């Protein structure tokens, strides 16, 4: 009975989200609460919710302060010299332009926001593509690749996987660093090959004229926020925060909290200015944090009520024990295409917990299932998924049709996932 109730709850969850009858925030709270009450748990449902929210607190806190930290440093102009330097370096050589596009997208995606990455990268590079007649699908492709292979501890899919399985983001991320490095080699290798192909197509060889794209002009409001004299202080602060975070010496939420405080004091010492910077980024921080806390309620109810375990037992009955060790490998292979079917909330909070619990009962560590999902599900998959706004942002900014973007870019994104999955097997992250 519990397994059936849990299955109905999960189907209802992503059905309501995909059809947009309810927002993820509302669905993640309402659906499991109704399921628990229907299963007869009564007031115990409240205890399940509190336990789930408490477990998710550090993850939500990390995300809030990560958004504030990177937002403040971007407002202060830390990325401006880097962006302008890339634009000066690429000139009119297609290979440099395409690789520069990938590098710019990779750097901008440090804040974990796909929308910001494309809003900065595409308008900055598009004039060069237009001027030289380069295929705009390539810009959409390499920007998607760079953002998709950048699954840092504070990006949305990583936070969701951590929240759903109650595993710290850094614990999931550390074994994946070599996989990401291999993925990034593929990103820039692909960018180089695409650039060379464009050089050949356009006849832009060694004798091509060199053109320098002018830096983007800042609005009056943006210029007032810039702190160019504090560029190196901000760079050192960013390096210290990220290095400490990756080392695991200090908990990520603590590091981002301290980093945010220092960034505010260094760049905007006036109280009113600090309040304005927090207000400017509060909406983005609150939206994701509220979804994460709602997800805590969902996983708290599903776990505390026993529905998750009951569903896992049903799944286990249909998976031969001798094949259990292959589950992470199979999920990794399917992870990128699954982005076309499931939005991130319904997959990470609805599907992944059941798969991870099933794997656990068969002796497979849940962390491997999380890592397998992160090699494609809304990482390499999000820039082409019709279920994410970022996809439509890409095609809108580049002027490329959605079908053309998907047809051109999906093979590269899928290849990146397959390469990282193969590397995971070779390195020993996944058993085969």
Image: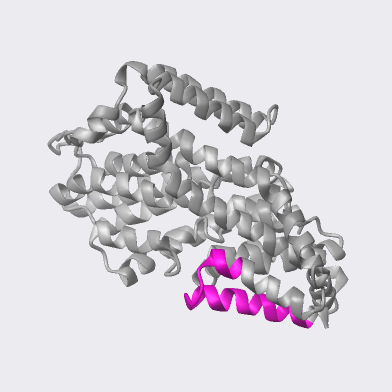
Residue 6 on the magenta segment: yes
> Is residue 391 in view from this perspective?
yes
Name which residue lies at 75% across and 63% down: 46
Location of residue 214 in the rendering, given as x and y in whole percent from the top left corner = 16, 34
Q: Which residues are magenta?
A: 4-28
Name which residue lies at 27% across and 42% down: 97
Q: Is residue 176 above or below residue 271?
A: below
Q: Is residue 91 above or below residue 233?
A: below
The C terminus sits in image quarter: bottom right
Location of residue 95 in the rendering, given as x and y in whole percent from the top left corner = 29, 42
Location of residue 374 in the rendering, given as x and y in whole percent from the top left corner = 60, 55
Q: Nearer the viewer, residue 358 or 231?
A: 231
Question: What colouring does the structure picture have?
Answer: one colour
Tell whether 298 sits left or right of 395.
right
Q: Nearer the viewer, residue 417 or 378?
A: 378
> Is residue 336 in view from this perspective?
no
Name which residue lies at 42% across and 42% down: 281
Tell whether 358 sits left or right of 293.
right
Mainly helix, strand or loop, the magenta region?
A: helix
Location of residue 87 in the rendering, given as x and y in whole percent from the top left corner = 25, 34
Name which residue lies at 48% across and 45% down: 112
The image shows a total of numbered marks equal to 0
The N terminus sits in image quarter: bottom right
């Amino acid at each position: 009975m519990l397994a059936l109730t849990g299955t109905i709850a999960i189907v209802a969850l992503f059905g309501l989200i995909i059809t947009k009858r309810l927002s993820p925030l509302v669905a993640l709270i309402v659906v499991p609460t109704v399921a628990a009450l229907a299963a007869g748990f009564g007031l115990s449902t409240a205890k399940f919710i509190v336990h789930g929210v408490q477990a998710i607190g550090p993850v939500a806190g990390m995300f809030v302060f990560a958004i504030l930290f990177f937002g403040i440093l971007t407002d202060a102009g830390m990325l401006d010299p880097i962006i302008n330097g890339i634009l000066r370096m690429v000139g009119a050589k297609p290979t440099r332009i395409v690789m520069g596009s990938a590098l710019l997208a990779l750097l901008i995606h440090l804040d974990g926001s796909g929308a910001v990455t494309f809003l900065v990268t595409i308008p900055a590079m598009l004039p060069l593509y237009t001027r030289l007649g380069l295929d705009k699908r390539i810009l959409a492709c390499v920007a998607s690749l760079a953002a998709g292979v950048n699954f840092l501890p504070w990006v949305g899919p990583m936070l969701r996987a951590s929240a759903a399985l109650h595993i710290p983001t850094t614990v999931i991320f550390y074994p994946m660093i070599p996989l990401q490095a291999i993925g990034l080699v593929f990103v820039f290798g692909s960018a180089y090959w695409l650039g060379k192909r464009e050089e050949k197509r356009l006849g832009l060889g060694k004798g091509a004229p060199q053109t320098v794209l002018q830096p983007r002009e800042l609005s009056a409001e943006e210029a007032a926020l810039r702190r160019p004299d504090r560029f190196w202080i901000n760079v050192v602060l960013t390096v210290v925060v990220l290095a400490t975070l990756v080392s695991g010496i200090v908990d990520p939420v603590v590091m981002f909290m301290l980093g945010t405080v220092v960034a505010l004091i260094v760049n905007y010492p006036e109280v009113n200015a600090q309040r304005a910077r927090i207000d400017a980024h509060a909406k983005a921080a609150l939206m994701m944090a509220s979804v994460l806390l709602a997800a805590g309620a969902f996983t708290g109810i599903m776990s505390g009520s026993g529905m998750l375990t009951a569903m896992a037992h049903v799944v286990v009955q249909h998976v031969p024990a001798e094949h259990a060790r292959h589950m992470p490998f199979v999920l990794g292979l399917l992870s990128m295409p699954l982005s076309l079917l499931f939005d991130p909330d319904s997959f990470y909070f609805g599907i992944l917990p059941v798969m991870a619990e099933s794997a656990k009962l068969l002796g497979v560590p849940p962390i491997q299932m999380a890592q397998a999902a992160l090699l494609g599900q809304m990482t390499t998959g999000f820039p082409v998924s019709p279920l994410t706004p970022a996809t439509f942002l890409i095609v809108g900014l580049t002027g490329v049709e959605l079908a053309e973007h998907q047809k051109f870019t999906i093979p590269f994104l899928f290849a990146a996932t397959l390469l990282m999955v193969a590397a995971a097997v070779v390195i020993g992250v996944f058993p085969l």
